[in-house]
Image (tube, rainbow, N blue to C red):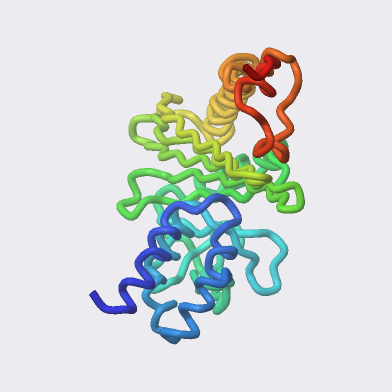
Amino acid sequence: MSQKVRIVAPLRRALYNPAPFCLAQITESKPAVAIKSILGDDSVHSLIPAFEKYNEEQFATVKLPGGSAEVLVSPHNSLGDGRYYDVESQSSYAFDHTSQKASGVQSYVLESNHNDLVKSLVKSLGTHASEHYPKASTGVFPTEDDTQLAILTVANKYSPSNFWNGRWRSSYLFTPSSGTISGFIKVDVHYYEDGNVRLLTNKEVSISVGTSAGASEIVRQIANVEKKYQEDLNKAFGSLSEGAFKSLRRQLPITRQKIEWEKISGYRLGQDIGGGRAR
């Protein structure tokens, strides 16, 4: 195995499932910078497939040059060769998966048998997201064979000064011919002050709205599912706090006093900690 493969392979693995907001930290970390300085730009180029996989799976968002709203990067709106499109702005753009910046914006007209429904869903979904998520980006895209519509939402909240970041992702496929919706909701929260705690959830969703359902009804059904899931998560957090987490806490020694860990080397085990006398 060459030196280049030995050095780059661990970094590529780290990119497949980093916590929210961590991609830039990984690529700008001292090990990554050192790799680039030793092996040159080719080392970064070899990581592009990992960057692309991460950005598309995580529904990365980016502001278009001259725009104010953030648009999505996903497998569902990929045009190939690093270009993606956005329905609302009627534009396509190139996306650099390494720097996470957009360029080369061009006009793009969607061609689909479901154009009217797509536009209505974009509007209804945007309203829903703005009412329920502090910072969200949405998108509705026909699948390649035009038999389904992908309905996507991503909401990010980053607070590095408080040592936590979080991401909500929901992805649904609506099939007009059957009036069914299937997909998932994924939540990823990372807390890293004095350690690492990460919450990863994945809820499968399957509902029927009927073949005559319009955009408002489809989004209403999605909103009901997401609200119920958030309520279930809140209940689960409460149960963990009062149950499992409490049982993990270390009980005080028999003296009912906390151990002074900085003096642990001076303790006589069993006597000082247990409160007994030396024999």
102 w.r.t. 224: above or below = below
In the image, taking residue 191 as reference, residue 207 lies left or right, namely left
Residue 113 in the image, given as x and y percentages of width and height? 39, 50
Q: Is residue 30 left or right of residue 278?
A: left
Residue 125 is at least partly visible in this image: yes
Which residue is found at the position 59% from the left and 20% from the top? 240
Q: Is residue 77 visible?
A: no
User: Residue 5 or 129: which is nearer the viewer?
Assistant: 5
Name, please, the residue furthest toward the front: 279
Residue at image x 66%, y 45%? 194
Coordinates of residue 248 in the picture (x, y in percent): 58, 22
The residue lying toward the viewer, choosing from 25 and 266, is 266
Give the answer, above or below, for where 31 lies relative to 224.
below
Query: As rendered, which of 17 and 245 lies closer to the eye?
Result: 245
Count of labels shown? 0
Quadrant position of residue 209: top left
- The quarter of the image holding the N terminus is bottom left
Q: Residue at x 68, y 14 (%)?
A: 276
Classify the position of the C terminus by image quarter.
top right
Residue 117, given in percent of the width and then of the height, sits at 50, 44
Q: Is residue 197 above or below residue 178?
A: below
Name the residue nearer the viewer: 185 or 78.
185
x, y percentage for residue 103?
57, 77
Residue drawn where x is 69% and y is 67% of the image? 67
Is residue 130 left or right of 201 when viewed as pictured?
right
